[in-house]
Structures are given as C-alpha cells and as structure tokens.
Amino acid sequence: MTTTTDRAESITVIGAGRVGRSIAAAAEAAGLEVELRIRANGLERLEGRTVLLCVPDQEIAPLAGQIGGQAGLPRLLGHTSGATRLDPLAGHSSQGSFSLHPLQTVPDGETDLAGCPAAVAGSDSPALDFATGLAGTLGLEPFPVSEADRAIYHAAASIASNFLVTLEETAAGLLSEIAVEDPRAVLTPLVRRSLQNWTERGGAALTGPIVRGDTATVELHRNALAERRPDLSDLYEALALQTSTLAAEPR
C-alpha cells in the first residue's frame, strides 16, 4: 500500500490536451520524471507506474477499464476530473486510486498552474496523502473534497468561472446592441473592481439598485429587457432574486 511518506518520482500522464500538457509541464519543472502519452496508444507498459488520466470525463471509465485489463496494473491510477468520483478507477490499479483537479481555467497547454488550488481525493487515506503530496510537488495548493460532495463542488467551480464569462458576454452583448464601441473594454474596469471587492469583502461588496432598495430602477431594467431582450428576462429575475437574498443577509 501507499504510505504517507510516498512521494511521486515519476508519473505517466495520459491525455495530451490542455490539462495534460500543463500538468506534465508542472511535473517536469518540479523535477519529476514525466511521460506524456496520447490516449489512443498510451496504455502499454504501465505496470508499477503512477498514472494520471487527463481526459474528458466520459472517457475516464472506459479508459480505466482498458488499463485494468492489461497484464500488469499501474501502482496508482488517478484522474483530473472535478465532477467524476473515484468509482470508475476502482480495481484497475494495485495500490489505490486518487484524483487531482486544478481549480483553474486552463485555456491552453502552457497554462502555469503554480499556486492554484487543487481538489484532491483518494480511495483510502494513503492514496489521499499521496494525491495531496503530488499536488504540493506540482506547486498546487491541495484541499480535500469528499466523494459525496464532488458534484456540488464542481457546480460551484462552474458558477464561479463559466457563468462569470457567460454573464459578462451577456452584458457586453447588450451594450453592443446600443452601439457602444468595444463593450469589453468599457466593462473591464467595472468587472475587475467588482471582483477585487468580492475577494476582499465577500457579499458585502454588493452595490447597485437592489442593495439600495431602488425598486423603481429595477423596474426600469425589467421593462427595458422585456421590450428589447425578453429572452433575458428570466435570467435577470433569477439573478435579482439571489442578489436580494444576499443583500438581506447580516454582515
């Protein structure tokens, strides 16, 4: 079994996409022996190795099954999915399974992951210790997420990252429809300041008509959207309701 003193000296990364290449680069920079393989032909000679699957979520289970069907099993088998549990990896390694999910947007294969948080999990305590140590070796800041909480963890991550981009693109789209030139440039200072305020103050950073109780202005918003962009009315109402709830919480 793995022990708390185990530290990765080498790692095989299967999946040469953005996450796989970025993790491989971090491993190499940390002085680990790293082997980056494409998943189409990367399943040979894995016996005794630490293997990390950096593939789309739907490919984890079938790929793990193929690995488990080999004559020699890897020592440890892990994946980098935030939402996928460890169940698909069970029985396909000799000493346990783990996951390591960098909580970071990875736009390309050269993304610097140094200092970013990483959710870790393990099939047992030694496997979790190993995942925690590996994350630290790669320059990440590990924190544990239980199997039962994986989906809600990943939902939170998606709201914080993906939905933020969706909201800003929606706002920029509204400005472009009223002939504002370069809406992204116009909105960027506001967005940056709002994000900085939230980083420093949390919910106390809320400003605007809902927080002020300016119902007349909120009604102007509703009417304008109903006339110009009725497809966005439900989105506005949902966000307005959540903003009202946050604004009412004691600080």
Image (cartoon, grey):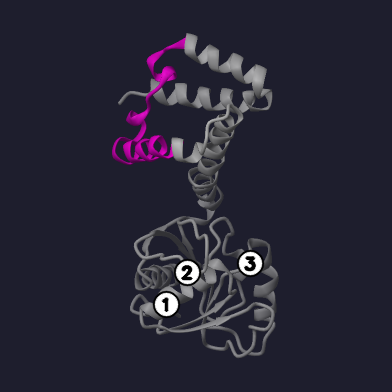
Numbered disc in front, either 2 or 1: 2
N-terminal label among 3 and 1: 1
N-terminal label among 3 and 2: 3
Q: Which residue is found at the position 48% from the left and 13% from the top?
A: 217
Query: What is the spatial separation of the Cα atoms under label 3 and label 2, in whole angstroms?
Result: 28 Å
Label 2 element class? loop
Numbered disc in front, either 3 or 2: 2
Q: Is residue 160 visible?
A: yes
Q: In the picture shown, does residue 151 fall above or below 92? A: above
Q: Which residue is under mark 2? A: 110
**37 sits left or right of 2 in the view:** right
Label 1 element class? helix
Q: Are marks 2 and 1 in contact (CB under 8 Å)?
A: no
Q: Which residue is under mark 1? A: 27
- Quarter of image, res 185: top left
N-terminal label among 2 and 1: 1
Q: In the picture shown, does residue 70 fall above or below 194? A: below
Residues rendered magenta in the picture: 187-215
Numbered disc in front, either 3 or 1: 1
Q: Are marks 3 and 1 in contact (CB under 8 Å)?
A: no
Label 3 element class? helix
Residue 166 placed where, x, y %? 56, 41
Query: What is the spatial separation of the Cα atoms under label 2 and label 1, in whole angstroms?
Result: 13 Å
Q: Which residue is under mark 3? A: 88
Q: Is residue 79 visible?
A: no
Q: Which residue is found at the position 37% from the left and 27% from the top?
A: 206
Query: What is the spatial separation of the Cα atoms under label 3 and label 1, in whole angstroms?
Result: 24 Å
